[in-house]
Image: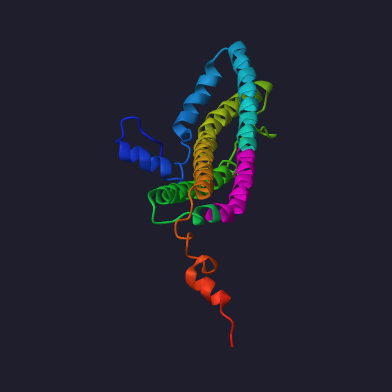
Amino acid sequence: MTAAIQDAPSWRRAYDWINFWSRLPRAILLTQQQHQQISEQIRTMPPAGRRLLITAWERQNDQLSKDLESVRNRGMALLTATGVISGVITLLIPIIAAAHGELKPTSLLPAVLLFVAVVAFLVTTYCAVATVVLGIRSQEVDVWAQSELHPGDGNSALAYELVYAFTLYITYSDNVSRFANPVGYLRQAQAYFRTLVQALAVLLLASVVAVAAGVLVPDGGASGSHPLHSPAGSASAGRVNP
């Protein structure tokens, strides 16, 4: 699933939307050269400013962890809702088939209703599968960095402070890049789920119209064709074997 580009042609944007089976590109992390630059900047900044940044980075890392947990909870809720809807669709399939089977397939209205119902059912099924796949991907376990200090990382309080500030920033920067993928999967799963609900509404509407049409439109082929109402049937019924 590639990210949609604003100036991409319409067919490409449409393909990007329906292409749920491919994956987003891996997160772009900081390079070793950037690590060295950041370490030097932290080392040379005033102590008061460094401590202020340490406090801010701690708060940002905590908030990012909460955001990740929120994304996973929403993905789980989306999977639950999709499972419920899929169960309802499974129960409705015989009823919907019976409703459309009551109409004559040769007239225009049943053909249109059947076409709408088939398209809505296919869209519903496709969107349900896409929602499940993307909802699961939004909860996949991935590398998630955290700031750690170990004995031997420094030989003074200042050295530990420098290492701690450096790991805090690197952890936050890399995790922000990693966080984009679960959010992207969840956002597209929600879009598929909205389409799923809309297609299900169209499917139910077409079935209700089919039921109403089956009740209101008489079956032209049934009139005068039953043996009990035909002259031949009456004669046969009144004949007595010698």
Q: Quadrant of the C terminus?
A: bottom right
Toward the viewer: 54 or 125?
125
**Looking at the image, can residue 94 be seen?**
yes
Image: 43 above or below 75? above
Residue 30 appears at what percent x and percent y?
48, 33
Q: Quadrant of the N terminus?
A: top left
Total tally of numbered discs in the picture: 0
At a point 65% along the width and 29% down the height, the residue shown is: 66
Q: Residue extending furthest right?
A: 151
Toward the viewer: 191 or 1?
191
Toward the viewer: 63 or 219?
219
Taking the magenta stretch, the answer to whether it contains residue 109 is no
Image: 149 above or below 219? above
Residue 34 appears at what percent x and percent y?
46, 29
Toward the viewer: 217 or 28?
217
At a point 42% along the width and 45% down the height, the residue shown is: 19
Taking the magenta stretch, the answer to whether it contains residue 86 is yes
Q: Residue extending furthest bottom?
A: 242
Side (left or right) of 226 relative to 79: left
Side (left or right) of 24 relative to 75: left
Residue 199 appears at what percent x and percent y?
49, 42
Q: What's the magenta region?
A: 75-97
> Magenta stretch: dominant SS?
helix
**Looking at the image, can residue 130 be seen?**
no
